[in-house]
Amino acid sequence: MSEGKDTLADLRRRCGRGLRETAKLVGLTEQQYRAVEAGDRGLDGFRVRPLAEALNVRPDVIENVVQILPASTFGQKIAAMRRRVGLSQAGLGELMGVGPNQVSRWENDRSAPPLARVEDLARFLRCSVNDLVESGDTGSLDHMEMAMIDKFAEVPEDEKARAFALVMGILSGFAMVPKRPSNDDGKS
């Protein structure tokens, strides 16, 4: 850090937050957060926005004073954000209409919530969809990813599962899209 630049601890003290309180707001233990402030540990990209909000600064201010780690897996983000808002797996499962075992599978990257429900998940975790799906070192989506998310939001609810299957098929190299029921009587 260059001389004269605020440290993360300076920013925290200036806004009147304690170390323990700040750590909890970003879903870290007190020891983990202390290591971030000391520069011994980087900060996950998805934690930048909550920390910036907690310290009443812009996200770029945080990015300038701590090392930002590459984005974690989707499941790790769900787990960290769930803990940050004080929900158990059972509590999040209840809100999402699934069991705690399903939430565990999401958090361990063995499955993922339906794309049509990611907006609900973000709302329950008090974050943005971008926070959940962000990629890259700075935690921001590139223009193509953002455009895809915006377009997906325009898809009618009854078509979201089909659209998701199409996108995932394309991304994985083959498209296996569930056939849409035909409006005709089966004639070609």
Image (cartoon, rainbow, N blue to C red):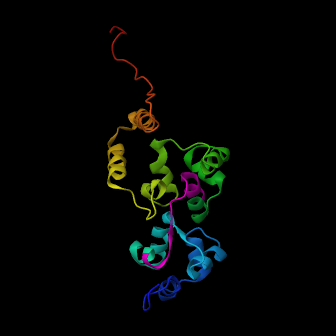
Query: Which residue is at 32% across, 45% downward?
Result: 151
Asked if the stretch drawn in magenta spans residue 49, the answer is: no
Q: Position of residue 98 (x, y in %)?
A: 60, 43
**Image height of 5 relative to 103, above or below:** below
Q: Position of residue 179 (x, y in %)?
A: 42, 22
Query: Which residue is at 64% across, 45% downward?
Result: 105
Q: Quadrant of the C terminus?
A: top left
Asked if the stretch drawn in magenta spans residue 75, the answer is: yes
Q: Is residue 106 left or right of residue 146?
A: right
**Image height of 77 relative to 25, above or below:** above
Residue at the farthest top position: 187
Q: Is residue 155 left or right of residue 139?
A: left
**Image height of 7 relative to 156, above or below:** below
Q: Position of residue 115 (x, y in %)?
A: 47, 43
Judging depth in this view, the residue of 176 and 57 nearest the camera is 176
Count of numbered circles in the view = 0
Query: Which residue is at 48% across, 55% downward?
Result: 132
Q: Position of residue 117 (x, y in %)?
A: 48, 45
What stretch of residues is rendered in magenta? 64-79
Query: Which residue is at 35% across, 37% downward?
Result: 156
Residue at the farthest bottom position: 4
Judging depth in this view, the residue of 97 and 167 nearest the camera is 167
